[in-house]
Amino acid sequence: MSLHPSMEIIPDKRKLVGLVEQAYEGKICLPDFQRDFVWPPDQIADLLRSILRGYFVGSLLLLRCDRDKPPFSPTLLRGAKSIYTEVKPELLLLDGQQRLTSLIYALTAPDLSLKGTKLRRWFFIDLDLLTRDPDHDDIVIERSKRDIDDLHTPAAQYRRHLVPCTVLLRPADFYKWRDGFEDWVRANQPDKEAIFRSEWRQAWQKIVDRVQNFEVPLVELPRVAEDDADAMGRVCAIFEKLNSTGVDLSVYDLLTARLYRSKIALHQLWEEACDNNHLLAEWSGGKADTNKFGVLVLRTLALLRDLDPKPKMLIALDPVGFEADWRRAARAINRALEIVTAVHEDGMGVFHRDWLPNYGLLPVLAALRAQIEDNKLGESERRQVRQWYWCSVFLERFSSAVESKSRKDYSEFYKHWFAGGPAPSIFDDARRIASAEFSIRSATSNASGIYCAVFCLLAKRGARDWQRGEHIELQALEDHHIFPKDYLKRHGVAPGDRTNTVVNRTLIADQTNNKIRARAPAEYLGLSDVFCSAPGPLLEPHFIDSPALGAMRIALDDRSESGKASAQAAYDQFLTAREASLLAAIREVCGVSAGANG
C-alpha cells in the first residue's frame, strides 16, 4: 500500500493479543462509517489456524486520535465492552476490522451470532492434534450452543485435551486452565500425570506462547485535526484505496461519521431525499452507495457552494446550513435524472439506467439546472447546458479527473451567465467533433459513453421496433446488430470490433432480432414478419437513410468468393453512410457543424 508522501507514518510490530485486548476494552475503535463485521465461523477458524502455524495474517492500519475529540464518530468493534462510560478511543482502526473482530469473538466468546448462523459459537484448539499434525484443519474446531455438548465444562475440555480460545487472551487465564488440568489429571488419570509434567506441559506452553507472542505489522497514522482539510482528504484517499477491492467506502461514509458530531444525521437526510425524490430513489434503489449516489449529491452540494468537489473538500464540508443545502442538491440530482431520462427533443434519451453515458456528469448538470431554474434563466442557457452535456459525452471528458472538470465547467458557466465571462471552453473543444477525422466506429459496447449516447439518440429520434412499430416507452427494445454477425462471418468479416461497432447496432425487439438472425439484409428487408410496413420510413429514425438502406439492399447471401467481396463492400458502404448520418445528429446536439473552425 502506498500512502501520500506528506502523510507521516509510524511502522511497527505489536503483539496481536495486546491489540485484541485494547479493542475489547474500547481503546481501539472503528470510525462509524465502517461497514458491518461479515466473517462466518469458518473464516474465523482459518485465521486462528494461520496464527497457530505462524503464518502472515496481514497488516493493520490505525489512526492515532485525541480520546476526547476523535476526527470521526467512533464505534466499538462487535463484541467489545468499553471500560469507559463513553466511547473514547486512543486509536481508530482503518484497516483490519474483520481480523480484529474475529479474534475478539474467538477469544472472548460474546453472546452474538455470526454470519450464516443464528447461534453463538465457541472455538477450541485440539492440543494433541496441533502437536502431532499442525497442518490438519481440525486443530481448530468451533461449536454452536446446539452442538457444544459438555465442552463448556472444564472436565470435558481436560478429558479431550481441547483448550478453549477464551483462555488465550491473557496468560493468567491459561495458567489457571492449565493448573486446573493438572489437578484434574491427578484425580482422574493419575497414570498420565507424569506424561503431563514431562511432555504435555511444555508442548502446550509453547503453543500458547506462540499465540501470546504472535506479532502483526501495523502502520499508525498520526493525529489529524478535523479542520485540516488536506490531512482529512488524505485519510479519505487511503480509505478509498484500501477498499477498492472490497466493500466500497466513499467520502459519503466518512462525512456521515463527521457530521454526526454536529448532530446532523446524513443517513436520515438520505432517506428523506429518497422519500421526496422518486427518481433518486428509483435509480439508487434507496441505497446511497449504489453508483455512489450519496457522493453525487455531495458533489452537487459542493458545486452549489462554489467548492471543488474533490474528496478532501467534501470531507470538510461546513455543517452550517448543510441540511438545507443537501435538500437542494438532492432535488437538483432528481431534476437532472428527469432531464436525462426524457426521450423528447429537450431530454437526453436515457431510456434505462444502463445507458447513462457517465454518472459523473450528473452533479454538473444538476447544479447548472438548479442555477437556471432558481434564477429563471431562459432558452439560451438551457440550450447551452444541453450542448455541454452532449459535447462532454462525445468528447469523453468525464472519463478521468471528474472532480476537476466538474468544477471547471460549472465555474465557467456560472461566470459566463452571471459575471459576463467568456463562453465555456468546452465549446472550443467541440471543434474535434466538427472535424472530418472524428469517428465513433471504435465504440463497441455500452462500457463506452459514446456507445451509450448513440443509443440515447436513437431513443430521442423515436426509433421503433420494425415489426411492432411502437415507441421505446411502450416496448422493451434491445441492442442488436443490423448486419447480423453470423451473416458477416459467413462473408469474411471476422467477429470483433468491425462487426460490433455501434454503427452496426440499433434498438429492436428480441423477437424481431430472432427473425433476422443470420439472414442477409437484402433478404430480411423483404420479410413482412420483420417489417410491419415499407422498410424505408421505419428505418429512418434508426439513422438508416437512403444511402445506408441502399447498401443493405445489395447485401446478398452469396458465399462465392466474388459474393463475399460484394457483401464486404456493401457492409463498408453501409458503415460509411450510417456513420455520416449519426455524426450529423451528434454535431447537431453538440451545436457544431461539419468542418466548423470554432
Image (cartoon, rainbow, N blue to C red):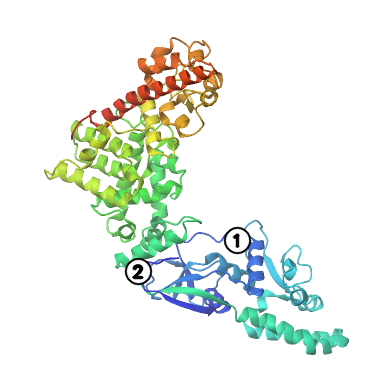
Q: Which residue type does callout 1 highlight? A: Trp
Is residue 217 shown left or right of residue 182? Answer: left
* Front-lying residue, 26 or 563: 563
* Front-lying residue, 448 or 459: 448
Is 301 drawn above or below residue 11 in the view shown?
above
Is 68 drawn above or below residue 514 in the view shown?
below
Dot label at residue 293:
none
User: Residue placed farthest to the left in the image?
Assistant: 420
Residue 71 image point, x, y percent: 37, 68
Is 150 drawn above or below residue 461 in the view shown?
below
Q: Which residue type does callout 2 highlight? A: Pro
The residue singled out by tag 2 in the image is 5
Is residue 105 shown left or right of residue 268? Answer: right
Quarter residue 206 falls in: bottom right
Residue, x 40% and y 13% (percent of image)?
536
The residue singled out by tag 1 in the image is 39
Q: Quadrant of the C terminus?
A: top left
- Separation of marks 1 and 2 at Cα, in angstroms: 33 Å
Is residue 266 shown left or right of residue 40? Answer: left
Residue 362 image point, x, y percent: 33, 42
